[in-house]
Image (spheres, rainbow, N blue to C red):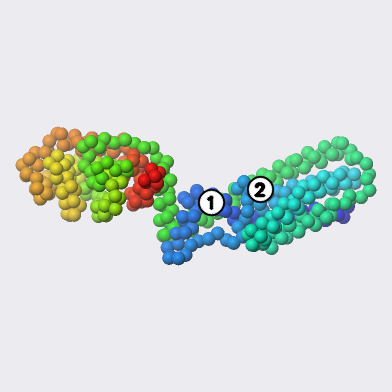
Amino acid sequence: MNARLVAAIVLMALGAGLSARRWVQEPSQERRSSAGTIAGGGAALCSATGEPGTRCELPNGRASTIGGVPIAALGVAFYGGVGALLLLATLGSAGLQRQVAAIAFRPIAVGVVADVVLLGIQLFVQHDACALCLATYGTTFLTAALLFRPLGPDSGAPDPAERRMLLGGWALATAVVLVAVTVGEMWLRQQWHAQDLQATLDSPAKRDAYDAEQAVVKFQASPALTFDLREAPRLGAADGPIVVVEFVDYLCPFCRQLYGGLDEYLAQQNGRVSWYFKNLPLDTECNPTLPSNYHPGACLMARGAICAKNEGKWVEFYRAAFTGQFENPGMAEVTRLGVHVGLDRASFGTCLRSPETIAAVAADVAESARAKAQGTPTLFINGRRAPLWTYIERLVTVESERLKL
């Protein structure tokens, strides 16, 4: 067996090992971006450290890629494929070995040129040449030097059957190498995804950024629905380009939280946002879709809101409902609330019991069911559901950017 052929095989194995180590140690930008995309936006998660003036950066010397595949992974495939060809040649005659060495020299020469280009990029563009990179380049250069001259005297053409067997074995070995590289890259991407997601879950600031990004993704993917807003009370702009529909329960503590900052928020929107309200009392008296009665008395409060709207007093009723303290309010308590905001006791009481008012609440509940709004507050921005009401500002900003406001 020719010593130079054996040395070339050893160098190819060494190059494959060095490339594999680079491949595993140096996360590519694309791989991390892919993991970040799955997890909800890599850059945003990375920057959400919660500490002013700090940011999370990718490691220095991150791998360059071609078509999203790290060059180190392509190196493993290159060294593995050429090495397999040379190794199979050792099973054949001297003539076959000589011919295979001549064939293998061509891709290795191309590899030398590619390594020179990569080295130039690292030295003069990235200003960072890693030791493993230099070592892999060295294996390519040495292998090219070993195979530059013929392995020995010409002993004639190899047997055609022998050559066919070698080519068949090499095709199979190359396919195995490519499959291994593909599976390896998929596994590494999965590992980066798991690590990034775990880091996100371990950090409250990153978790919040993750949830916000997920809300944006779900919001943009949701279908746009239409709502009948002709009789719905409104805050904010009369005809804003961004229409928010809130399904509200006047006994819901989260609706109360949203109420607390809504006036200030709408005042900052400069006429961009029209905010409409629909009733969704979590009370089985008027909402039969519920498995249990979460807010007893919420149906009466919803009727009171409709009666107040009919008399031009909805805003006062809305504010009084969320600034007062109500727990399982009955007819008397809701009536007192109506009188407090300036409504006539007798006419308000009659309105609370009227079939028209009950039907109006039922219509809102039915509309919420069609929109699959199961909790409160549930918000829709220009017809698209906001997955998390706590990120309403972020989602309105996303919608503003979409509309180029």
Q: Secondary structure at mark 2?
A: helix
Residue shown at 66% from the left, 56% from the top: 121
| Rendered image quadrant of residue 159 | top right
- Left or right of 257: which side holds 121? right
**Residue 50 in view here:** yes
Residue shown at 78% from the left, 41% from the top: 169
> Which kind of residue does numbered mark 2 sit on?
Val
Crowding around mark 2 (Cα neighbors within 10 Å: few <14, some 14 to 19, many 20+) is some
> Which kind of residue does numbered mark 1 sit on?
Ser
| Rendered image quadrant of residue 403 | top left
- Left or right of 398: which side holds 252? left
Query: Mark 2 — residue?
Result: 181
Query: Mark 1 — residue?
Result: 33
* Farthest left residue in view: 346
The mark that comes first in sequence, 2 or 1, is 1
Question: Residue 87: x, y in percent?
Answer: 80, 48
Q: Secondary structure at mark 1?
A: helix
Residue shown at 66% from the left, 52% from the top: 71
**Residue 284 in view here:** no
Q: Nearer the viewer, residue 391 or 195?
A: 391
Q: Nearer the viewer, residue 104 or 376?
A: 104
Q: Which mark is residue 52?
A: none
Looking at the image, residue 121 lies above or below residue 281: below
